[in-house]
Amino acid sequence: MSAFIERRLAAQGPAWAVATPHTAASDAAADVLRGGGNAVDAALAAAALLTVVYPNQCSVGGDLLALVGTADGEIRCVNASGRSPRAVDVESLTAAYDVMPVLGALPVTVPGVVAGWAELAARWGSRPLAAALAPAESAARDGVPVAPGLAEDLRRESAHLARDPGMRGVFFADGDVLAAGQTLRQPHLARTLAMIGDQGPSAVYGGEVGASLVKLLAGRGSAMTREDFAEHTVRLSQPGSASYDGVEYLSSGDNSQGTYFLQALKALDVVRTARGPLDPAGRDAGVVARVLAHAAADRDRHCADPDWATVPAGELLSDAYVRAIAEDAMSDSPVRLAGQRKVSGDTVAVVVADADGTWVSLIQSVFHAFGASLLDPATGVVLHNRGASFSLDPASPNRLAGGKLPLHTLMPVLTRRAGELSAAHGTMGGRAQPQVHTHMALHLAAGATPERAASAPRWVLGAMEAGVTEGAGVVKAERDVPVAGVEAIERAGFAVERIEAYDDGVGHGQLVRRATVDGQPWLAAATDPRADGAAVAG
């Protein structure tokens, strides 16, 4: 337990820095950087290890999005999200359900994380992918202590997990879920990681690992085939951007909600120009909530697979449109919200910068805690439920269809100042990720340290219960959000529900940023106390 109690929440160094939500993952990345590897090598080592130590939040059976920025000024988005089965029977599913199911085989899309790892290693890494996977393989085979965050999710999700033989075989002992500090061993996952190290992504997309996952899914009613896995591809693209107080923020587009974070940030810059520096936990909380609610509504109206629908990113980020959002948010007009879906999502963020000027924001996830609550006993792989984000509304651009990417919550973030890369940000928080990023951005712009920006009292808009809440929406506010902030949110038309301080229900963030120490350029890293992570720098 001491590894989690005595965590390093902030660190500074002249050459490199890393932050992740688990101490072991941060240490794995730091070992790579100390050994001469670059930021991408380090991010991959951390990402792979997180699938072992945080299987509630990410898995070989999940998805990945990342931004990589290099010293020559190139910034690329790696979108490894996976598609629905091509043969999915939409009519039958729509007849049986009002909304997409969350658990079981039906919401499982092709897991893209391994393809994303391979793309990152091949394009920017200095070491083979097998080297990044080796520490994870050893940890899965030898066992790791259950982290407090994992233990909490095991308790919360125990009823769902108990229904699946694969989950019971890994996460239960003597009839109950593993507790914090107990040893979690995953020998079948260790074998899977070894196979991926030996064979590369073909082990999943056409090989033995993928075949086993497809067999499990088919037995549970999915239309997934080995061909669906074999046809998986990674999309490379340019990020979108928006500026706040002179800092350019970059995030993912396409089927990612990154565009809607940029929209909110750009609208809030209009508010800042009118009001001065914004305090999201104080007097400005209401106007921030209104802007974020508008961005969330736009996401739900427009975000979809770009191969199936035209996402009007140019219009959504236009000066005229964001000014209208800002002016409405600053007015006294009644707040207008569509139903707000549950703020949910279990995700990990890995942020790294190295001495060569490479910056990485890597986000991977199983979506809800333990994803679809399915674990393949033969491979040890937990399967995500990313397809739960599809709509069953025939009018929605995000409506379920065969071979389609779902609306995706993952959204890596990099920043530039005066044309130079200056930070890597990442958050957990599902549909609330744009909100968590916004809180951190506003705190940083107001002069907060990275550690303070990650740990400051936080609130997020979204119902705590499952399903849809009609009307003005519910804001979950940590108990140490100041009274002035709570009152501002209520005046803006939202109901406020208080939760405990440092509750991971408001997401958690990771930061690496440029800093100046004694007049010299350094790197500063910070990790959120709501997770089990550490910041390391050298």
Image (cartoon, rainbow, N blue to C red):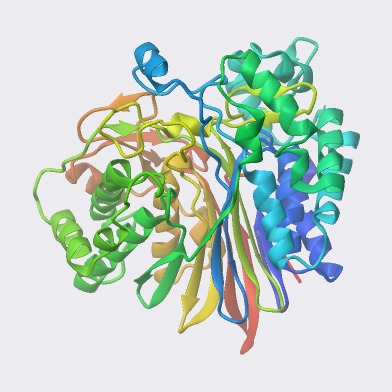
Q: Nearer the viewer, residue 247 or 391?
A: 391
Q: Is residue 347 left or right of residue 505?
A: right
Q: Report if residue 6 is visible in the image.
A: no
Q: Report if residue 47 is visible in the image.
A: yes
In which quadrant is the N terminus drawn?
top right
Q: Give me the residue at 51% from left, 31% from top.
A: 86
Q: Nearer the viewer, residue 441 or 221?
A: 221
Q: Is residue 142 left or right of residue 220?
A: right
Q: Position of residue 157 (x, y in %)?
A: 59, 21
Is 521 situated above or below 143?
A: below
Is 166 situated above or below 113?
A: above
Is 491 situated above or below 375?
A: below
In which quadrant is the C terminus drawn?
bottom right
Q: Is residue 323 left or right of residue 387?
A: left
Q: Position of residue 377 (x, y in %)?
A: 77, 21
The mark total stands at: 0
Q: Position of residue 85 (x, y in %)?
A: 53, 30
Residue 89, picture quadrant: top left
Q: Nearer the viewer, residue 61 or 485?
A: 61
Q: Give me the residue at 46% from left, 61% from top.
A: 251
Residue 207, picture quadrant: top right
The single residue placed furthest to the left in the displayed view is 333
